[in-house]
């Protein structure tokens, strides 16, 4: 598997190329992947952060051929470059409006709001929107129907699990959206971070097992402690994760706790969580 180098164009398939933004990190891996779909009239999926050299590289790659800019979601590493690229190319921006929770790109204003199952149909390719809330409520994946290739944004990432951060992120919605992917006829995932995933159904099942396993561990930790706040719980429920990542892990931990509350297995009392006995 070749190394992902930000700024270099990589061929993914006959219709798809990848250009990764220079924003590597703990949360972004090698950087945010932007995908160019087509050969004549192009679609750009996830233009990425508003980094000048990245925008310039994308504009050079598309030339005069860009017609559509699609965003999977509006976190700050995925959509902010859309505004500058639209201004430069007059391409149509497609996606869903950002939630106002302080973690989203409020500059993102789609020309077309995509609903679940809607298609962008061109003479060369078709992209179908698949609404996959969980990581964020507005999250869309896009299925390139001719190749059965699903652009997954941050719903599924290669080599890592995604953060689910309430209030906009929802663990219950995320698990339901993962199950939704199992019903799709998909051959590969093209994630927002990392390499193409060759066995998508296996990866989805692995993620579901991981999340449910973490949920059990959270409930076991809560039962053992009797009453605990999130800061105390993360040490026990995420003892297999580096303490440096615990501030981030606490966001997903809270999402697990809220799901347990919805399922009648836990309750929050004055900022502390308690497990509820099974009836």
Image: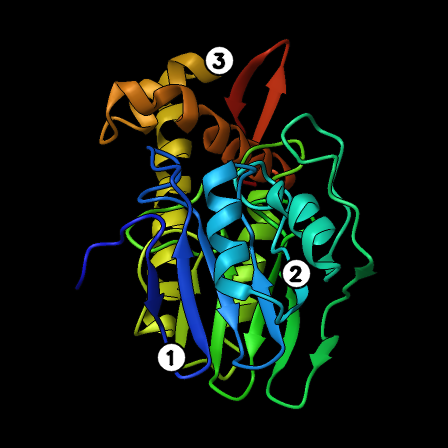
N-terminal label among 2 and 1: 1
For disc 2, the neighbor class at 10 Å (few under 14, some 14 to 19, many from 20) is many
Task: Indicate the position of residue 214 as horizontal and vertical percent values.
Answer: 36, 41
User: What's the residue at 72%, 62% (across, down)?
Assistant: 91
Identify the secondary structure beneath mark 3.
loop
Mark carried by residue 13: 1
Alpha carbons under labels 3 and 1: distance apart:
48 Å
N-terminal label among 3 and 1: 1
Give the camera-side residue of 104 and 223: 104
Identify the secondary structure beneath mark 1.
loop
Left or right of 202, for residue 192: right
User: What's the residue at 52%, 28% (across, down)?
Assistant: 254
Pointer 2 residue = 69
For disc 1, the neighbor class at 10 Å (few under 14, some 14 to 19, many from 20) is few
Pointer 3 residue = 229
Rendered view: 170 above or below 41: above
Identify the secondary structure beneath mark 2.
strand
Would residue 225 be seen by someone viewing this image from the given angle? yes
Closer to us: mark 3 or mark 2? Answer: 2
Quarter of the N terminus within the rendering: bottom left
Task: Indicate the position of residue 115 as horizontal and vertical percent values.
Answer: 77, 66
Give the camera-side residue of 212 and 245: 245
| Badge 3 vs badge 2, beta-carbon distance below 8 Å | no
Task: Indicate the position of residue 49 as horizontal and vertical percent values.
Answer: 53, 40
N-terminal label among 3 and 2: 2
């Amino acid at each position: 598997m070749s190394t992902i180098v930000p700024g270099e164009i990589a061929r993914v398939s006959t219709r798809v190329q990848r250009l990764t933004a220079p924003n590597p990190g703990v949360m972004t891996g090698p950087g945010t992947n932007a995908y160019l779909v087509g050969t004549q009239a192009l679609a750009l999926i996830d233009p990425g952060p508003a980094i000048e050299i990245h925008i310039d590289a994308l504009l050079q790659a598309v030339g005069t051929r860009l017609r559509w800019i699609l965003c999977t979601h509006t976190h700050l590493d995925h959509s902010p470059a859309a505004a500058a690229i639209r201004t430069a190319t007059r391409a149509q921006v497609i996606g869903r409006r950002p939630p106002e929770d302080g973690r989203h790109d409020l500059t993102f204003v789609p020309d077309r709001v995509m609903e679940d199952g809607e298609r962008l149909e061109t003479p060369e390719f078709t992209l179908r929107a698949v609404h996959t809330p969980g990581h964020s409520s507005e999250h869309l994946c896009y299925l390139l129907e001719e190749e059965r290739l699903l652009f997954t944004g941050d719903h599924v990432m290669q080599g890592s699990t995604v953060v689910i951060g309430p209030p906009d992120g929802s663990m219950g919605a995320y698990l339901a959206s993962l199950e939704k992917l199992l019903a799709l006829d998909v051959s590969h995932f093209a994630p927002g971070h990392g390499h193409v995933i060759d066995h998508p159904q296996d990866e989805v099942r692995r993620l579901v097992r991981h999340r449910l396993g973490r949920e059990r561990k959270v409930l076991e930790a809560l039962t053992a402690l009797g009453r605990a706040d999130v800061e105390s719980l993360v040490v026990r429920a995420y003892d297999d994760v580096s303490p440096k990542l615990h501030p981030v892990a606490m966001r997903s931990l809270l999402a697990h706790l809220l799901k347990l509350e919805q399922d009648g297995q836990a309750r929050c009392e004055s900022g502390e969580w308690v497990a509820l006995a099974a009836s």
